Amino acid sequence: MSKVIDSFNFTIGRVLAGKYRIERLLGRGWEGEAYQVTEVKTGVQRAAKVFYPQRNRGDRALRAYARKLEKLSGCSALIRYHHTDSFRRSGQPISFVLSELVRGEILEDFVKRQRGGRLTGFEALHLLRAVARGVAQIHQFGEYHGDLHDRNVLVRRRGIHFEVKLLDLSSDKSSTRHRQQDDVIDLAGLLYGMVGGRKWYARQPPEIKTICRGMKHSLILDRFHTSSDLVVHLDGFGWDTPR
Ligand SMILES: Nc1ncnc2c1ncn2[C@@H]1O[C@H](COP(=O)(O)OP(=O)(O)O)[C@@H](O)[C@H]1O
Ligand SMILES: [Mg+2]
């Protein structure tokens, strides 16, 4: 029986598995903690996602995550998988995934940092397009994301564009049309959150409401059967609001 660990809190400078020096905590979630690490031998920077053992029994979560990232290595919006490693803590094996280090900010923090803690409609639609294209790529590979929320999207501005990387795909179930449609609903949910959520929704222009549809799932799916429908819409809709 593995001991429950709900935080690792590695100190800066600690070396994992004799190979990866901890530089800083990148973030934590349900499955584990992600750190920026330096590969001691090469000086190369990586991200290490260290799994809490109780969320990764028999390395199931780690194996599924690694395989799914590898299967989707053609998707430019996903982090690049490198390899896995492990070490022991109080006799218990702890495993981690080494991946590309993404220099970006989680969407939640990016939105909070904006004036009023929300994005303008145009910015939000522009960012949504970048995320929706990433999700459409995943769907084209016959897969689904399954855990699309504002702490699993990393954002970085470049020129007039938003570069996004999607993290943390849920990997325990096989892909179905239904799970892909849940991703479409989550995309609408991301837009809803970016423009200020419930507090600001009533005041949104039609360009936002046509996508969020009051966050009524059936209405969203009536309009957008697939993530590609949403991308096509974002690339070509007409503006109702005079500007
Ligand atoms: N490759 C990476 N580059 C930069 N930050 C990352 C990376 N992987 C994870 N993070 C950060 O760590 C957090 C937790 O990682 P995540 O894979 O989402 O774990 P969990 O499954 O526990 O939610 C993310 O929300 C993000 O802030
Ligand atoms: Mg996460």
Image (cartoon, grey):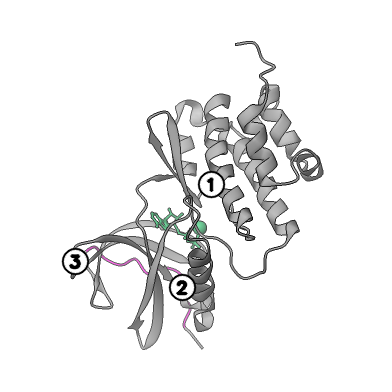
Q: Which region is colored magenta?
A: 3-12
Identity of the residue drawn at 51% across and 88% down: 1
In terms of sequence position, does the residue under pointer 2 or pointer 3 come before the other? 3
Q: Is mark 2 within 8 Å of ligand 1?
A: no
Tag count: 3
Provide the residue designation for mark 2: 52
Residue 56 seen from this side: yes
On screen, residue 28 versus residue 235, left or right, reads: left
Instruction: Give 19 or 235, whichever is nearer the viewer.
Output: 235
**Residue 134: percent from left, percent from top:** 54, 48
Instruction: Give 24 or 70, whichever is nearer the viewer.
Output: 70
Provide the residue designation for mark 3: 42
Q: Which mark is residue 150?
A: 1
Split into quadrants, the picture shows ligand 1 in the one at bottom left
Identity of the residue drawn at 67% across and 68% down: 174
Residue 120 seen from this side: no
**Residue 69: percent from left, percent from top:** 49, 64
Identity of the residue drawn at 39% across and 62% down: 34
Mark 2: which amino acid?
A: Tyr
Mark 1: which amino acid?
A: Asp
Q: Is residue 121 above or below residue 68?
A: above
> How busy is the neighbourhood of tag 3: few (under 14 within 10 Å), some, or many (20 plus)?
few
Q: What is the C-alpha distance between the residues marked 2 and 3?
A: 27 Å
Q: Quadrant of residue 197?
A: top right
**Residue 235: percent from left, percent from top:** 61, 31
Mark 3: which amino acid?
A: Thr
Q: Are marks 2 and 3 in contact (CB under 8 Å)?
A: no
Q: What is the C-alpha distance between the residues marked 3 and 1?
A: 33 Å
Magenta span contains residue 30: no
Magenta span contains residue 8: yes
On screen, residue 232 versus residue 77, left or right, reads: right
